[in-house]
Image (cartoon, grey):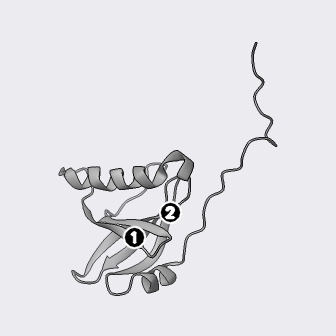
Amino acid sequence: MQIPAPSPAEKPALTQPTYPTPAELTRMMPGGYAFDHLVGVGGMGAVYLGRQISLGRQVAIKVMKRGHGADYGYEERFRREAQAMAQLNHPNIVAIYDFGFIGKEFLFFVMEYVEGTDLYR
């Protein structure tokens, strides 16, 4: 016997979390990073262009809301992604500089910023 697929009304809605503005994130992470603007939002988080203040360099900062997709292990996958990327060293892979928490609500990792377009263009 085949079980019918749920109708669209029965499927749980997966909503994209909202992320703070660059100014709000800069206030939430005093002293370490300055967020300039949002680059893009994907399934695991949002990426911002920013500056690492201590070294005066441009960086990309990926932010994920804790608890978003908790049923799917997003927080653990985010940590593993940062740790795995930090172990890699290749000219075609961005370097990871930092990883941590922004208050109780967000995770982040800081990576090398590479100018260019996304893969969808």
Q: Residues within 10 Å of mark 1 (few under 14, many from 20)?
A: some
Q: Nearer the viewer, residue 38 or 87?
A: 87
Check the picture and name the quadrant holding the N terminus: top right
Q: Determine the CA span between mark 2 and mark 1.
A: 9 Å
Q: To which residue does mark 2 refer? A: 66
Which residue in the protein does label 1 denote?
Answer: 101
Question: Residue 75: horizontal and vertical position, in percent?
Answer: 45, 55
Asked if 57 appears above or below 2 in the picture, the reply is below
Q: Which numbered marker is on residue 58?
A: none
Amino acid on which the number 1 mark rests in the picture: Phe
Q: Quadrant of residue 32?
A: bottom left
Left or right, 66 with respect to 96, comes to: right
Q: Report x, y in % for residue 50.
A: 37, 76
The picture places residue 102, in percent across and down from the top left corner, at: 43, 74
Task: Evaluate if marks 2 and 1 touch, with contact meaning CB atoms under 8 Å apart.
Answer: yes
Residue plotted at (62% across, 58% down): 16
| 56 is higher (above) or lower (below) than 15 | below
Q: Secondary structure at mark 2?
A: loop
Q: Is residue 42 left or right of residue 30?
A: right
> Residue 49 occupies which quadrant of the picture?
bottom left
The earlier-in-sequence mark between 2 and 1 is 2
**Viewer-proximal residue among 52 and 7:** 7
Q: Is residue 105 left or right of residue 91?
A: right
Pick the front one: 80 or 42? 80
Taking depth in this image into account, of 105 and 56 the one nearest to the observer is 105
